[in-house]
Image (cartoon, grey):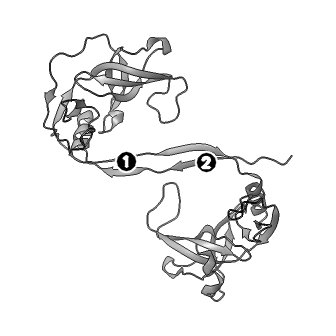
């Protein structure tokens, strides 16, 4: 049996957004150890506050301060915390209705064990030692023996010095990727500086990278065909935003390249030419990475540009 290829894969997209007056006040308040909600049309205090009434969809602006203590409404035990979660030791995910609030807030509860957690238990906020204006300013909740706070929540004008006006939300997915039969053969041949595709027995098209089946006919593809190494730029884009952990200076160009003999264009970076000189029809060839396992980028071959009719079906 041939070796099964696997590799760790990380998909990461930090999302940056600006804040309106409601979210700005809420996050700035957390930095100042103040929890704010917003009064909905039915009189409920919504925490975390929403910019629009969840029932009527009307804009909300009436901010209210609630207590840092509350009651667990439901929970789930997390025995194996993962990277980036609030606590490194086992904890409970809890929905907590803070005193004075009409909705529940999702966060972590630091408890000694599963048996110490129950619906209805009293908890309070444990504030982070360093606060920046983010939901992580609440380090977690912890058990609390005190009774519910008395009195009505106090109105708040939402004004703080140096308000938080924007946040960056990290989104990341870590998993192990295992290519199938077709892609495993493709990757192994790249290590020999060869690019192979697979031909559909029905439509006779050669797909690179191979998928194991024809996306048009739906039949298995197992006839290997060597293509390239040269090809033609069919279309491209200029990248002006530097990606994290990618040591390439902007601007640079990514293109779809139809390798000679292939009926599907693959995605690769273009180098060895100023970004504003890349064009459709440009003839290119691979420049292999230092370890020789894959093309680092493609560069111009010096050949005349390909005629548009020769690649128009691959755009």
Give the residue at mark 2.
Answer: 9
* Label 2 to label 1: alpha-carbon separation: 22 Å
Question: From the image, which quarter does the C terminus lie in?
Answer: bottom right
Question: Relative to 172, is 121 above or below?
Answer: above
Residue nearer the viewer, 115 or 242:
115
**Which residue lies at the image location 15% right of the left edge and 18% below the top edge?**
151
On residue 168, the disc is: 1
Is 176 above or below relative to 215? above
**Residue in the image at 22% along x and 40% along y:** 25
Are circles 2 and 1 on residues that touch, CB within 8 Å?
A: no
- Depth check: give the residue in front, 278 or 210: 210
**Which one is nearer the viewer's eye here, 251 or 180?**
180
Residue 62 figure quarter? top left
Q: Residue at x 34, y 35 (%)?
A: 135
Q: Is residue 101 above or below residue 251?
A: above
Left or right of 165? Residue 315 is: right
Side of 291 relative to 52 (left or right): right
Chain-order first, disc 2 or disc 1? 2
How many neighbours does mark 2 have within 10 angstroms: few (below 14), some (14-19), or many (20 or more)? few
Residue 192 on image: x %, y %: 79, 63
Which type of secondary structure does the marked residue at label 2 adopt?
A: strand
Q: Position of residue 271 (x, y in %)?
A: 58, 73
Q: Residues within 10 Å of mark 1 (few under 14, many from 20)?
A: few
> Considering the numbered disc 1 on the image, is that residue within a helix, a strand or a loop?
strand
């Amino acid at each position: 049996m041939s070796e099964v290829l696997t590799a760790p894969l990380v998909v990461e997209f930090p999302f940056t957004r600006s804040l309106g007056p409601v979210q700005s006040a809420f996050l700035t308040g957390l930095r100042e150890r103040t929890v704010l909600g917003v009064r909905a049309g039915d009189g409920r205090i919504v925490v975390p506050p929403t910019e629009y009434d969840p029932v009527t969809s009307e804009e909300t602006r009436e901010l209210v301060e609630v207590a840092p203590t509350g009651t667990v409404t439901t929970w789930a035990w997390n025995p194996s915390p993962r990277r980036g979660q609030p606590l490194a030791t086992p904890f409970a995910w809890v929905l907590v209705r803070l005193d004075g609030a009409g909705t529940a807030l999702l966060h972590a509860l630091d408890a000694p064990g599963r048996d110490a957690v129950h619906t209805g238990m009293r908890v309070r906020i444990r504030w982070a030692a360093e606060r920046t204006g983010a939901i992580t300013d609440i380090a977690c909740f912890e058990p609390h023996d005190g009774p519910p706070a008395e009195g009505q929540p106090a109105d708040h004008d939402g004004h703080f010095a140096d308000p938080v006006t924007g946040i960056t939300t990290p989104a990341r997915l870590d998993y192990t990727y295992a290519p199938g039969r077709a892609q495993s053969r493709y990757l192994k041949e790249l290590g020999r500086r060869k690019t192979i595709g697979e031909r559909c027995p029905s439509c006779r098209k050669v797909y690179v990278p191979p998928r194991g089946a024809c996306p048009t006919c739906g039949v298995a593809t197992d006839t290997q065909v060597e293509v390239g190494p040269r090809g033609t730029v069919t279309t491209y884009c200029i990248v002006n935003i530097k990606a994290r952990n990618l040591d390439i200076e902007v601007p640079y160009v990514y293109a779809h390249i139809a390798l000679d003999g292939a009926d599907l264009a693959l995605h690769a970076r273009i180098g060895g030419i100023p970004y504003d000189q890349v064009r459709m029809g440009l003839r290119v060839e691979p420049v292999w990475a230092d370890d020789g396992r894959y093309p680092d980028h493609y560069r111009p071959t010096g050949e005349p540009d390909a005629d548009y009719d020769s690649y128009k079906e691959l755009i």
